[in-house]
Image (cartoon, grey):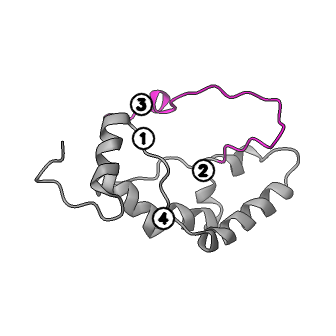
Amino acid sequence: MIETSAPAPERLSWLEVERYRAQGFISPVEALSSDEIAPFRAQLLELIGSTSPRLTPVLRHKPHLFLAWVSELVHHPTIVAAVRDLLGPDLLAWRVAFFIKPPNDPGYVAWHQGILYWGLVPA
């Protein structure tokens, strides 16, 4: 049920907000157009191509602290607006990580929820 005192969502629809509250996720969320995301994708592909075979831990974990283009993406107004619609205005980018699994990689990653390990209260 929609709270009447809640501010109107800026980026998402009321239905998406309610779906998030009921299910814990929404998908898909269109944030950037193909043209807008292209420069970020190019940067990522360049980064991946320059490391062999995998990203170093410094670049894989919290890359927004080292790479301006990652920080720009994390702070993109459209993305922040969608997150703000779900979580409210008091936001913190706690962790950004590249979780890349190349095509045909035999590795397996099970479903998990990292928040269990972070110790943030409330979640």
Q: Earlier in the sequence, mark 2 or mark 4?
A: 2
Name the secondary structure under disc 1: loop
**Circles 3 and 1 in contact, beta carbons < 8 Å:** no
Q: How far apart in space, not on screen, are marks 1 and 4 (Cα)?
A: 20 Å
**Circles 4 and 3 in contact, beta carbons < 8 Å:** no
Q: For residue 80, what is the image quadrant?
A: bottom left
Name the secondary structure under disc 2: loop
* Quadrant of the rendering where the N terminus is positioned: top left
- Residue highlighted by disc 1: 25
Which is closer to the viewer, label 2 or label 1?
Answer: 1
Which residue appears at 87% of the width and 44% of the height? 53
Q: Main secondary structure of the magenta part?
A: loop
- Residue highlighted by disc 2: 62
Q: For residue 107, what is the image quadrant?
A: top right
Which range is magenta?
Answer: 98-123
The amino acid type found where label 2 is placed reads Lys
Q: How far apart in space, not on screen, are marks 4 and 3 (Cα)?
A: 24 Å
Residue 120 in magenta?
yes
Tell me residue 47's x, y (percent): 78, 59
- Residue highlighted by disc 4: 75
Q: Nearer the viewer, residue 69 or 79?
A: 79
Q: Is residue 15 left or right of residue 71?
A: left
Q: Is residue 111 left or right of residue 120?
A: right
